[in-house]
Image (cartoon, grey):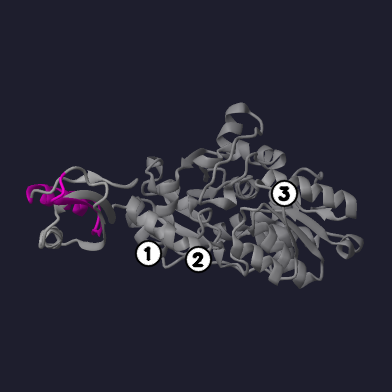
Amino acid sequence: MSAHSPPNIVTLADVRAAHERIRSGIYRSPCPASVPLSDLTGAKIFCKLDLLQRTGSFKERGARNALLLLDDAARARGVVAASAGNHALGLAYHGRELGIPVTVVMPRFAPLVKVATCRRMGANVILEGESFEDARQRASAIAAADGLNRIHGFDDPRVIAGQGTVALEILEDVPDVEAIVVPVGGAGLLAGVALTAKALNPAIRIIAVEPGSAGSLSASLAAGRPVQVQVRPTLADGLAVGRVGDLAFALASPHIDRVLTVGEEALSLAVLRLAELEKTVAEGAGAAALAGLLEGACPELMGRRVVLLICGGNIDLTILGRVIDHGLAADGRIWRFTTRVSDRPGGIAKLTAAIADAGASVMEIVHDRSFSGPDVFSVMVVVTVETADRDHGIALRQKLLRAGFAVGTAGAHS
């Protein structure tokens, strides 16, 4: 922090200083306009692609700034942090680049790709507990026992100043931006972006997006102070924080214009839309800004120049396929249903012919003879089909009914 700022205050001057300090080691990510997302949402969309950082997320900014502000003795001892993944990756990479030992404590649910990458970068990785809070307590204990400098992932003024540099770059690239949509977990990124953007242009709207499975920001705003909430499993694991940071909340809360809460289907659909329309693979947390707009909860942004922070791309490939399938189902492009067919030659052929006539494609058919009821001459089948969109699925259902097939539900998206 600058010599003119108290230790728990972050100013525009601190953010500008952080930008100069870190710029030689941080990728200057682009903020291009998106025609397909603009068409989809009705706003004039720009995407700040900070998932293109070396370790796949914006967290490098705050990590590098904090490391560069250490004195020589602290650098020699090293640092420790608790992280669900991306803060750990940022510290591990820049710690290696700067020759500073790094220990990271990660909850056991942290994505395997992030754990493996941290270790590959030379960090000492400790897996602790089932929540971020468990990892935080272990990191605090290590810091006290070993004399390490603890770098909090979102409630450290050095980190918040580093994250605020995103807003400086946005305003360089899109000087007439009217709204910035920011994913929020612990609120460090939100604090840095909000205080910077509002200092430069108070008319910019700051829209925060949080997962419904970890709604600490909205609960804290309602209470007027940071409060703890229960965290449930979420695709946006990088936002799975049960309590926003005290400093982050104090800095961000005066500048927030709207908080959007998104569900898991919206997050899956946002990951799918970015992959399909922008050729960009984002993790759930990185796609949260788009998820907020996809739910249509911000009609006031129609026609406005809006920047989405696409800020993380570290999604396990083992999960990505499931997320895409979930997104396709939420989009009405995969449909699963049950029906009965004659258990005689030609029974399945009649069903598949009706599906083909509707222009749909069969992905899977599963027979269930054992639990099909007393009619031994018919069989229950579970059918998964691929359709063009939700309207196509409705048309297919109607065609099947007209062909004499009783259609039942099977699965969450039927």
> What label sits on residue 11 in the rendered view?
none
Give whichever of 184, 352 is nearer the camera. 352
Mark 1 — residue? 276
Whether 394 is among the magenta residues is yes
Give whichever of 244, 159 is nearer the camera. 244
- The 10 Å Cα crowd at callout 3, few under 14, some 14 to 19, many 20 or more, is many
What amino acid is found at the position of numbered circle 1 in the picture? Glu
* Image-quadrant location for residue 186: top right
Q: What is the distance, in whole Å, between disc 2 and disc 3 at their CAs?
A: 24 Å
Mark 2 — residue? 317
What amino acid is found at the position of numbered circle 2 in the picture? Leu
Camera-near label (1 vs 2) is: 2
Q: What is the distance, in whole Å, between disc 1 and disc 2 at their CAs?
A: 16 Å
Q: Residue at x 81, y 45 (%)?
A: 7
Local SS, label 1: helix
Give whichever of 195, 241 is nearer the camera. 241
Local SS, label 2: helix
The image shows residue 280 at horizontal and vertical percentages of 45, 66
Q: Are marks 1 and 2 in contact (CB under 8 Å)?
A: no
Q: Residue at x 42, y 68 (%)?
A: 279
- The 10 Å Cα crowd at callout 1, few under 14, some 14 to 19, many 20 or more, is few
What amino acid is found at the position of numbered circle 3 in the picture? Ala
Local SS, label 3: helix
Q: Residue furthest right?
A: 73
Vertical order, 242 against 342 (above or below): above
Camera-near label (1 vs 3) is: 3
Whether 336 is among the magenta residues is no
Q: Residue at x 37, y 43 (%)?
A: 296
The answer, for residue 339, to whether it is visible in the render is: yes
Tell whether 404 sits left or right of 307.
left
Mark 3 — residue? 135
